[in-house]
Amino acid sequence: MSKADERRKIAKKKLKKTAKLLLVSFLMIVVCAAFLSFAAFAEGDTLVNINGDSVDTLEIIETLTLIALIPSILIMTTCFTRIIIVLSFVRNGMGLQSTPPNQVLIGIALFLTLFIMSPIVSTINTEAYEPYKAEQISREEFIQKATEPLKEFMLKNTKKDDLMTFANLANTTDTKPEDMPITTIIPAFMTSELKRAFTIGFLIYIPFLIIDMIVSSTLMSMGMIMLPPATIAMPFKLLLFVLVDGWGLLFKALASSFNL
């Protein structure tokens, strides 16, 4: 076994340990919050004093659950999925295993998502968060007003076939997309995003595949059969990507591919 394989195994073990610790910590927080709520119910008092204000323990549990679901909400209801998949296709197409690293790709995808979704975020802030912060609307109204811009964004970027497929599976009687529940729109939106991301990835792969074919046929004609074509093709792929300003074109195409 090589040293690289040993390092990979050690890194995988560390990641598993970190994931287990995070999972255990989250479960402990949920259990403690549930214990506090049950204790409060037993005593007949469901309020907890925080900075002089009384807060319902059930609201604390709901807030903790919402915080835990924020990564899933980010992935399912925004343009993050398409961006990160396309970036992964670009890295694999150039034959690079870990460059750019996963942390860099996730950071790029996050900030591109924030850039693309900035009009929707500002709308949610103006129409939902600010009134809720000023205690002008209730929590139910805040959730309803915050989901409306996201729902509109997802409908604009969801294919009708995917939407009708999940509407038929859910046996919904609503014929208008605007009247459909968000639980039906989200899986349809995710399906459409995956289709578009893989289509873009296929188109990105074509020039890199042509370079691989040219290099491999050239090496075969020269009798260099034992020389791996991927090693020779990688510098040409990088040169082509840099000369055509690949990153700039990619980010521009991704940002303009969404309907806002």
Image (spheres, grey):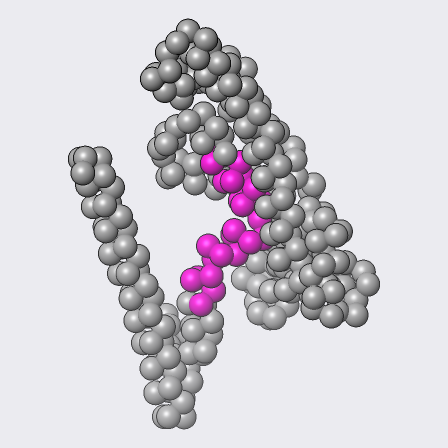
Residue 141, above or below 177: below
Q: Residue 158 appears at what percent x and percent y?
A: 69, 49
Which quadrant of the view contains residue 140? bottom right
Q: Is residue 180 left or right of residue 78?
A: right
Residue 113, above or below 154: above
204 within the magenta span: no
Q: Residue 188 appears at what percent x and percent y?
A: 66, 55
Say which of 111 and 140 sits in front.
Answer: 111
Q: Residue 42 appears at what percent x and percent y?
A: 37, 92
Q: Is residue 187 left or right of residue 237?
A: right
- Is most of the magenta stretch helix, strand or loop? helix
Provide the residue span drawn in magenta: 65-88
Say which residue appears at 75% left-offset and 58% top-offset: 164
The C terminus lies in which quarter of the figure?
A: top right
Residue lying at the far right of the rendered structure: 175
69 within the magenta span: yes
Q: Residue 211 appears at what percent x and percent y?
A: 51, 17
Q: Is residue 89 left or right of residue 123?
A: left
Say which residue appears at 63% left-offset and 64% top-offset: 183
Residue 94 is at least partly visible in this image: yes
Which quadrant of the view contains residue 252? top right
Residue 4, above or below 38: above
Say which residue appears at 57% left-offset and 25% top-offset: 206
Residue 18, above or below 105: below
